[in-house]
Amino acid sequence: MSLVIVGSVAFDAIETPFGKTDKIVGGAGTYASISASYMYNKVKLVGVVGEDFGEENLNLFKQRKINTEGVEVVKGGKSFFWSGKYHNDMNTRDTLITELNVLAEFDPKIPTSYQDCEYLLLANLTPQVQLRALERMAHRPKLTVMDTMNFWIDTALDDLKEIISKVDVIAINDSEARQLTDEYSLVKAAEKIQKMGPDYVVIKKGEHGALLFGEGRVFSAPALPLAEVFDPTGAGDVFAGAFIGYLAHVQSLSFNNMKNATIYGSALASFCVEKFGVERLMNLSNEQIHHRIKEFVALSKFDM
Amino acid sequence: MSLVIVGSVAFDAIETPFGKTDKIVGGAGTYASISASYMYNKVKLVGVVGEDFGEENLNLFKQRKINTEGVEVVKGGKSFFWSGKYHNDMNTRDTLITELNVLAEFDPKIPTSYQDCEYLLLANLTPQVQLRALERMAHRPKLTVMDTMNFWIDTALDDLKEIISKVDVIAINDSEARQLTDEYSLVKAAEKIQKMGPDYVVIKKGEHGALLFGEGRVFSAPALPLAEVFDPTGAGDVFAGAFIGYLAHVQSLSFNNMKNATIYGSALASFCVEKFGVERLMNLSNEQIHHRIKEFVALSKFDM
């Protein structure tokens, strides 16, 4: 039994009002798998990098005991590269450079050792690659969660709708949910997305937390109010990784556990934004996570 | 012992994507006092109207057992009139008409029968009038809560800062908190506002709920996810009215009760937006309120 995560593994160069980075390790698969590794100990990653990625960067995954047998290294190839600049409000950003490189031809291969997959996360990636990865699973996973982004709504809507029709849970941010459904109300947007396939819809609202819709119920998870958001890159991927990682850990899909998974997702995301890239995520202790979860309890608990 | 609410009593004409109204009763004092009347039974209103307001409209307050001895009726005067149009997202609006009328010369009089005031709400109004009302209280109230709006930040900042320095709680919306403090982070904004005077800062975030800051703690209240927001006018005033009304009812200022007050504020506001003006608020049963509070519990409760 394992949790398989399919997603990009990449280099990012990020500029925020707090500073800028050279090329650092990024990618939805990276953020999601590192996050999930704090919840569950059998995380297996599928992705592709170029020869430039190097052993020292692959070591990040080894440090977190993430299986990288499914991460293809393309000889002579260059890794996916994204560069972006955040505005002062940290809620909007401009993409400066997108070089698909080895991601352009990515054909996901699922190693035999991954076919014990019970939990599958299709992290943000080309919908066609998400579809192919799902098809190549010998058994239908117990739970399939997907993420996406506005770029795929704009450029690959048909494929996106097809993969949405095949998953159990979609995690999507508020503006994307509105764009996908043409509904301003998130209640109506979630209803429409549920009709497209997923039983559960998680709408990520950044600094405003997340809403979980499913079984005719709604759960509102707060975001931790932060004095400083240093770098929001990857927070949504980290959310998705911890969400499915928690469910894999507890081996239960009850609504109560879905709620807890949403809280764990929010908690891990709140760490992610404290430093550039995956830096903060590489150095978390279980005590720190436990303490942050307690902060979420204090933040939202009332007795009535 | 009583709860005194100082605020505008007015006519509004509202246009939303769902329809438009003729002149209907509005004003911060109106919304706040009607809301508070569901929490506490000794609500006393201070305000001013013109002769055009009429007995039938003053009857709205009588129906809710709100004392209107402090509502001055200016003979031959016209009531404050505001007209606005909401955009499709319901989060932004254009003001079409503002006729101050009798509000321009408003000098708040506090009837002797109001001097048993223990809880004082200075609802959204000219900061100078808020200051004068507070000065005219024979005894310092046990708790003074104020609300304001961007217009006063733009046009009466010095008076606004003076009244802010004298209250215990300020309820303010997120964009106003940012404008007032020049801080994007709501944590930093709340800290700055606390340094200006109030021990507690409630930041209202509309569809994203509210944050309560005080005693070095934070509480995040969700907003009820709604399929349709019919008319957002007055929701912030309703929040403030139920907030202080709840505290007057329980006669306790513990942080736990502040949290509950925030939930009651959010719950009453969620009713307000379901119909135009005060219509929905005039016809609430205790059972409906109780049921809505239960929805807030279900919405935000998790067990960890």
Image (cartoon, coloured by chain):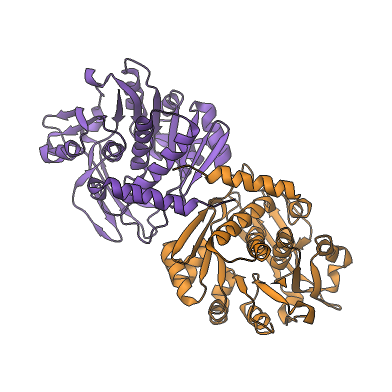
Chain colours: A purple, B orange
- How many numbered marks are there? 0
Residue B75 visible, this orientation: yes
In terms of depth relative to the viewer, which is nearer, B96 or B208? B208
Residue at the extreme top: A138
Classify residue B79 as left or right of residue B223: right
Q: Position of residue A139 (x, y in %)?
A: 35, 16
Classify residue A288 as left or right of residue B163: left
Residue A223 visible, this orientation: no
In the rendered view, would you say B229 is above or below B120? above
In terms of depth relative to the viewer, which is nearer, A42 or A179? A42
Q: Which of the 4 quarters of the picture holds residue B245?
A: bottom right
In the rendered view, would you say A95 is above or below A27? below
Classify residue A256 as left or right of residue A29: right
Q: Residue at x 70, y 75 (%)?
A: B117
In the rendered view, would you say A117 is above or below B296? above
Q: Residue at x 36, y 23 (%)?
A: A131
Q: Position of residue A279 (x, y in %)?
A: 23, 49
Q: Residue at x 58, y 46 (%)?
A: B297
Q: Position of residue B198 (x, y in %)?
A: 52, 73
Q: Which of the 4 quarters of the picture holds residue B31?
A: bottom right
Position of the N terminus of chain A, as image quadrant, is: top left
In terms of depth relative to the viewer, which is nearer, B121 or B280? B121
Q: Which of the 4 quarters of the picture holds residue B226?
A: top right
Residue at the extreme right: B55
